[in-house]
Image (cartoon, rainbow, N blue to C red):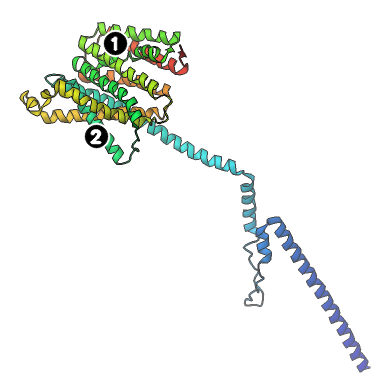
Amino acid sequence: MQGAAAAATSVSGASWSGATRGRASALASRHVGLAAAAAASTSSSFGPRGALAAAAPTLPLPRVRGGCRLRPLSLLSDSGWNGEVARPAAAAAASVPADDASAVAKGEGAGAGGIAATVQLGAMIVAWYLLNIYFNIYNKQVLGALPLPLPYTITAFQLAFGSLLIFLMWATRLHPAPRISAALLGKIAPLALGHMLGTVFTNMSLGKVAVSFTHTIKASEPFFTVLLSALFLGEVPSLPVLGSLVPIVGGVALASFTEVSFNWTGFWSAMASNLTNQSRNVLSKKLLAGDKDAMDDINLFSVITVLSFLLSCPLMLFAEGIKFTPGYLQSTGLNLQELCVRAALAGFCFHGYQKLSYLILSRVSPVTHSVANCVKRVVVIVSSVIFFSTPISPVNALGTGAALGGVFLYSRLTRTKKPKKA
């Protein structure tokens, strides 16, 4: 009986252990299948990241005191805290197209850059106005202090100072030096002659009449522009453009009749300055239009300045060379050092405001530049009247205002409609 019971017990134990082992192996195979399916779904759902998780070797679980094992932390898991953060971030990144993201980044950069560009442009315009004001003040003081106006010598000195700054600009590579051919130099030479003569006539006018009156006369430049463009370029102005010349001519005439410091030499020299300066502008369109060798505006102005200085030297030596020697100036009782300092400051301001004018024109539209130039003339006239205590009557102020208003209207009309070819 006991043997039968022991045999039965051993048989039942063997069958139980075999059944248990069978269930364990089935359960293990089931877990292996689930793990493989999870790895396959992870690899197919998340691409390389899932493949990396499936290919990662299984590390043995360390034991701690008490016999239990630590739960592994999967750095590649897409569940739990890491997964909750990773999935919305990945979805948000995938939902934003690359073009839109780059556009947003460019928009933010453009907004900051636009504000900086506007501030820089405003500073340049203020500097343009201030340099023009100080040029007229220093230039008038130098011309008024001399026993004779000496416009040729003052012009040569101003152009020499500008040429020195230009060579420094090229030497320090602040702006690349141009490559000039002989043909291009021949085209620029007439422009330099007009620039030099225009500066001479302006200094001649400033030496004879008030600064405000010189700039009032120079406000009639559009009249010469229309006349010379019709003669040399065949551009026929429209009726509104011709109408805008009426307040310009009428305002200049009214201001001239009531000007206290009126002088015929000062009047005609200012008119000659308008003629030569506008001839330079019209010739530049005719000679340099479509020229492949034409340079940028900064270098064009620089080359014109240097050539103007070279052309002014013979004229200065022939007309006034002996009168501007240090011995002659000291014999007049003038403070030679102060005179040279003010002349140097006038030369710096002269070159600076013209260079800034070109830089501003390269950043804004021609209409904006014309309006800013018109406002600049108003600022110069008002500041010179205040600084030199120039007497001005209401009729004179009315004429000056009418001329400047006509210039503003002309600048608006000529930029919105192109003139017709004859």
Disc 2 is placed on an element classified as helix
Give left or right: position of 26 versus 236: right
Viewer-nearest residue: 196 or 378? 196
Instruction: Say left or right for 359 vs 89.
Output: left
- Estimate the x, y position of residue 339 in percent, counting from the top left: 14, 28
Q: Which mark is residue 164?
A: 2
User: Which structural element holds mark 1?
Assistant: helix
Q: Nearer the viewer, mark 2 or mark 1?
A: 2
Viewer-nearest residue: 407 or 3: 407
x 13%, y 29%: residue: 338
Q: Quadrant of residue 273?
A: top left
Count neighbours of disc 2 (C-alpha within 10 A) and say few if under 14, some if 14 to 19, many if 20 or more. few
Check residue 397 in the rendering and tell me which mark sits there, or answer none.
1
Instruction: Look at the picture and state if 124 lies above or below 14.
Output: above
Q: Amino acid at mark 2?
A: Leu
- Evaluate whether residue 125 shows in this view: no
Amino acid on which the number 1 mark rests in the picture:
Ala
Spatial CA distance of label 2 from label 1 is 39 Å
The N terminus is located in which quarter?
bottom right
Instruction: Examine the image and state in which quarter residue 23 appears.
Output: bottom right
The residue under the point 61% across, 50% down is: 89
Compared across the picture, whether 136 is left or right of 26 comes to left
Q: Is residue 197 left or right of residue 78?
A: left
In the rendering, at what x and y percent does residue 21 appear? 82, 78
- In the rendered image, residue 242, in percent from the top left (x then y), is placed at 41, 9
Residue 233 shows up from this direction: yes
Numbered label attached to residue 295: none
Which mark is first along the chain, 1 or 2? 2
* Residue found at x 40% / y 14%: 410
In which quadrant will I find the C terminus? top left
